[in-house]
Image (cartoon, grey):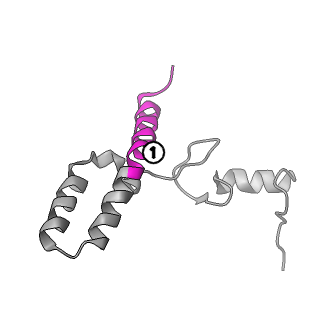
Amino acid sequence: MAKKSLIQREKKQNLEKKQKILRNSLKKKITETSSLDEKWEFQKKLQSLPRNSAPTRLHRRCFLTGRPKANYRDFGLSRHLLREMAHACLLPGVTKSSW
């Protein structure tokens, strides 16, 4: 059975994906309108969305291990796995630098 923290992480990710379109459309409306009252209304709607649907509340984690720190965006891996896989020639185009 999965750990409770993993289940919560999945819920946050799904909620963020579900609310992404609505959140972006509200932000776009806020920037496009010139009336201050309309901006406040859109801001209230934006604030009424669940907090966990904000993309800043998500944390990038390693794809294989789930490690929260030292992740490379290009690969989605932590530095430990990136190093091991690069040495094993499992990542194309990655070479060990030496000077």
Q: In this view, does 54 lie to the left or right of 81?
A: left
Residue matched to label 1: 17
Q: Which amino acid does label 1 sit on?
A: Lys
Q: Nearer the viewer, residue 27 or 65?
A: 27
Q: Residue at x 54, y 49 (%)?
A: 61
Residue 73 drawn at (x, y percent): 61, 60
User: Is residue 98 or residue 26 the one in the foreground?
Assistant: 26
Residue 11 x %, y % = 41, 35
Instruction: Give the SS element for disc 1.
Output: helix
Give the magenta-colored segment's residue range: 1-21
**28 shown above or below 5:** below
Magenta span includes 3: yes
Residue at 33% over, 46% down: 52
Whether the magenta-drawn stretch holds residue 80 is answered as no
Quadrant hosting residue 72: bottom right
* Left-right relation of 48 to 95: left
Looking at the image, the residue that sits furthest to the top is 1
Position in image of residue 62 (x %, y %): 60, 48
